[in-house]
Image (cartoon, helix red, strand yellow):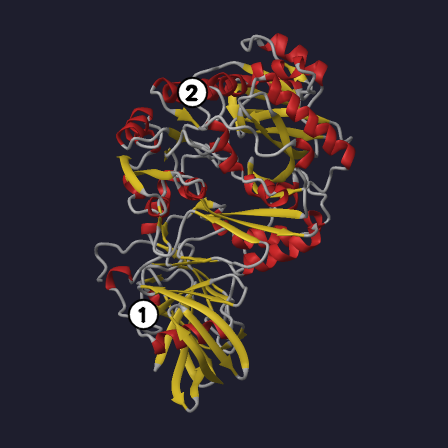
């Protein structure tokens, strides 16, 4: 089962496969053996690679709120995939970041370009996975701060997109 | 005499304090009757009460502040007494009078004491006359012209505070750092005071720099008994709202504690006080203390006093109101161990602590030895944008301050309120801060040492993602289309009623 989660502009995917005695969880190429010790309502008691993880997980539509141990809770959205992650809930400031550590393989736009929501702006690649950074809303490309071949860290700003509503003459 | 006069009590409040009062009623064998606005239909405070009377639409002015409906509800349900809690009508002398005119018992002080202490200028005069030191300042008739006020401000020394006679909790107040700012501050404070309190009278107080806020709990009965239950230190404030409180104060020594306790009793006696009240003092760097104001009601932070003294203040309030004598003698009141309270508010530290409304998907509180939680919400409840943001109070008690700090850190880590944003991460930051841990925090602490604080961008640790994925694998939930763009624009609408509050909230302090 492949699941996608979004936190801010960052989308990450997780593959969960049954594997006795529990599950094999693949996070962007890295694999973890997970045993479910208890699953009781919102409480989830796991062994991840032998380490106990006590979590509370609640959901509300796409929203997932996870509190692990005594740490502060984290809110993420479950999405249907990378493309899905470009819905209207994007940040107003339009600073699009790398969703993972990886290499920039293509920059599909230029400064000053007018782009529609969903347009691919940058393509990243890591561990044989390709990830597209797409425009979450229609706008104009203010700055591009990466180039093909750059190795970028997750969270690094790649493109600064200025919101600009669709013109009536433009399609879509 | 048992609390025989009162068999049914109407709680004219909501949230955690209404829950707290209902619990005290049950302990005394009294039937608690709740009131609820339409926004609070089915709220926790109605679930713990024996019965609930609906009192109107969500805005407080149409429900919780409607004297007529509240007294009508008490009569209809054959209650003998009304407990006002804090905020709302708790410090309205007119309400106290009307309750008594209706032949009901007001669980609180006499209207005259509320009225005197509600007029900050009259209160200063009364306290000075009773030999209690007030903050150096000037109070005349309240409508002095700028020339006279400027002369007085020069005498007091800058910075000075321009305060409204009808104010409190930071409202109608201006800090003036230089003579040329005085005229403008007086004008805007007058305007604000007239609008907020219908009373334009102003007075001046010297700003006590690096002050500590230390208050003393008093209890008085109608038979002439009056005692204090030691102090609470409440210097940890954000925009005049207390966030963390403790007892004992790390500042006081035995001598000062005794002096402040005696001053508080003198203050209460000077206004013929009956029931529970709090005398707030400011303590300067030279350790001199000054009367600031008296709160003529139960306080939000009363549990820390209960934890160290073992006296149930709300029960004492009800017993005193039904004519009983004080439950203890002064010489039997002890300050045992150390107690801390943290206020968990529905507010978003990432957005300047704006109130956060919404559904509580899960509320889970710590328990165990030395831990008490006074909560106003539970899983499934909705935090509406109409009332104050207090969700719950986490209170701990331990042998000493160090033990209490550790216990509180642990308790906050075990507190989960999911679905609305809370200030829990901010509370934990305060608890871990060396200035607070060292017992040296003043009322400037939050503003000076934590103004740059922002919640850490949580990132997405592997274990969080793994837990989410396993939860979705084990219990796949249908994705609700209507909520598929949650956390988006609709939040803005929910927040909008708060946009005009300018950071101050009425009521509980």
- Whether residue B198 is visible here, answered yes or no, is yes
Secondary structure beneath label 1: helix
Q: Nearer the viewer, residue B320 or A127?
A: B320
Dot in front, 1 or 2: 2
Residue identified by numbered label 1: A84
Rounded to the nearest whole Å, what is the CA distance between mark 1 and mark 2? 51 Å
Measured as percent of width and height from the top left, residue B134 is found at 67, 20
Provide the chain ID for the residue under circle 2. Answer: B
- Categorize mark 1 by other alpha carbons within 10 Å: few (<14), some (14-19), many (20+): some
* Drawn side of residue B12 relative to residue A153, left or right: left
Name the residue at 47% across, 70% down: A55
Question: x, y (%) of residue B229?
Answer: 63, 35
Position of B329 with respect to A127 (left or right) is: right
> Hey, which residue is sitting farthest bottom in the picture?
A20
Viewer-proximal residue, B440 or A74?
B440
- The answer to which quarter of the image holds residue B22 is top left
Q: Quadrant of residue B103?
A: top left
Q: Taking A2 as reference, is B79 above or below it?
A: above
Q: Residue furthest front?
A: B1
Is residue B301 something one can see in this rendering?
no
> Residue B94: where, in percent of width, then height?
40, 19
Q: Please name the residue shown 41% across and 29% down the image.
A: B5
**Toward which corner of the image does residue B126 lie, by quadrant?**
top right
The x, y position of residue B84, in whole percent, is 42, 31
User: Do marks 1 and 2 share a chain?
Assistant: no
The N terminus of chain A lies in quadrant: bottom left
- Residue B195's disc is 2
């Amino acid at each position: 089962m492949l699941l996608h989660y979004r936190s801010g502009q960052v989308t990450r995917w997780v593959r969960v496969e049954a594997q006795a005695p529990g599950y094999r969880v693949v996070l962007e190429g890295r694999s973890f053996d997970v045993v479910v010790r208890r699953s009781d309502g919102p409480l989830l008691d796991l062994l991840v690679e032998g380490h106990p993880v006590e979590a509370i997980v609640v959901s509300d539509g796409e929203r997932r709120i996870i509190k692990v141990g005594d740490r502060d809770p984290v809110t993420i959205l479950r999405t249907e995939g990378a493309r899905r992650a470009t819905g209207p809930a994007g940040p107003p400031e339009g600073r699009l970041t790398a969703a993972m550590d990886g290499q920039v393989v293509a920059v599909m736009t230029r400064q000053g370009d007018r782009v529609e929501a969903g347009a691919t702006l940058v393509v990243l690649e890591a561990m044989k996975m390709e990830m597209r950074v797409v425009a979450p809303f229609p706008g104009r490309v203010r700055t591009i701060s990466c180039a093909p071949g750059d190795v970028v860290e997750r969270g690094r700003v790649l493109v600064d997109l200025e919101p600009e509503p669709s013109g009536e003459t433009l399609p879509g | 005499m048992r609390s025989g006069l009162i068999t049914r009590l109407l709680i004219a409040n909501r949230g955690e304090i209404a829950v707290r009062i209902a619990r005290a009623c049950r302990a005394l064998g009294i039937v608690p009757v709740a009131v609820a606005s339409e926004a609070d239909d089915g709220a926790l405070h109605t679930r713990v009460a024996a019965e609930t009377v609906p009192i109107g639409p969500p805005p407080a002015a149409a429900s919780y502040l409607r004297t007529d409906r509240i007294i009508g509800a008490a009569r209809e349900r054959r209650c003998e007494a009304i407990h006002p809690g804090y905020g709302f009508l708790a410090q309205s002398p007119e309400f106290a009078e009307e309750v008594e005119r209706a032949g009901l018992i007001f669980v609180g002080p006499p209207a005259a004491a509320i009225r005197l202490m509600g007029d900050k200028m009259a209160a200063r005069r009364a306290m000075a006359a009773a030999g209690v030191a007030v903050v150096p300042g000037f109070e005349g008739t309240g409508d002095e012209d700028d020339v006279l006020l400027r002369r007085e401000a020069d005498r007091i020394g800058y910075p000075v505070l321009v305060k409204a006679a009808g104010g409190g909790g930071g409202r109608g107040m201006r800090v003036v750092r230089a003579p040329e700012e005085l005229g403008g501050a007086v004008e805007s404070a007058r305007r604000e005071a007239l609008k907020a309190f219908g009373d334009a009278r102003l007075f001046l107080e010297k700003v006590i720099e690096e002050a500590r806020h230390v208050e003393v709990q008093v209890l008085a009965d109608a038979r002439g008994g009056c005692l204090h239950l030691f102090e609470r230190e409440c210097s940890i404030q954000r925009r005049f709202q207390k966030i963390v409180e403790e007892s004992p104060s790390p500042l006081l020594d035995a001598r000062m504690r005794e002096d402040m306790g005696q001053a508080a009793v003198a203050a209460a006696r000077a206004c013929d006080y009956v029931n529970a009240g709090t005398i707030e003092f400011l303590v300067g760097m030279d350790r001199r203390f000054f009367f600031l104001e008296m709160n003529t009601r139960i306080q939000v932070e009363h549990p820390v006093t209960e934890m160290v003294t073992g006296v149930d203040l709300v029960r004492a309030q009800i017993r005193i109101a039904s004519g009983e004598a004080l439950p203890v003698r002064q010489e039997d009141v002890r300050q045992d161990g150390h107690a801390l309270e943290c206020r968990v508010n529905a507010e978003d530290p990432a957005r300047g602590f704006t109130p956060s409304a919404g559904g509580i998907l899960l509320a889970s509180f710590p328990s165990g030895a030395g831990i008490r939680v006074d909560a106003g919400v539970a899983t499934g409840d909705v935090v509406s944008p109409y009332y104050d943001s207090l969700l719950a109070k986490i209170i701990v008690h331990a042998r000493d301050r160090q033990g209490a700090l550790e216990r509180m850190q642990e308790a906050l880590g075990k507190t989960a309120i999911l679905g609305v944003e809370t200030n829990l991460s901010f509370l934990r930051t305060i608890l871990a801060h060396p200035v607070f841990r060292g017992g040296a925090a003043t009322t400037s602490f939050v503003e000076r040492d934590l103004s740059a604080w922002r919640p850490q961008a949580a990132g997405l640790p592997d274990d969080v993602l793994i837990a989410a994925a396993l939860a979705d694998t084990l219990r796949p939930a249908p994705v609700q289309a209507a909520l598929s763009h949650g956390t988006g624009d609709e939040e803005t609408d929910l927040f909008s009623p708060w946009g005009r509050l300018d950071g101050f909230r009425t009521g509980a302090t």
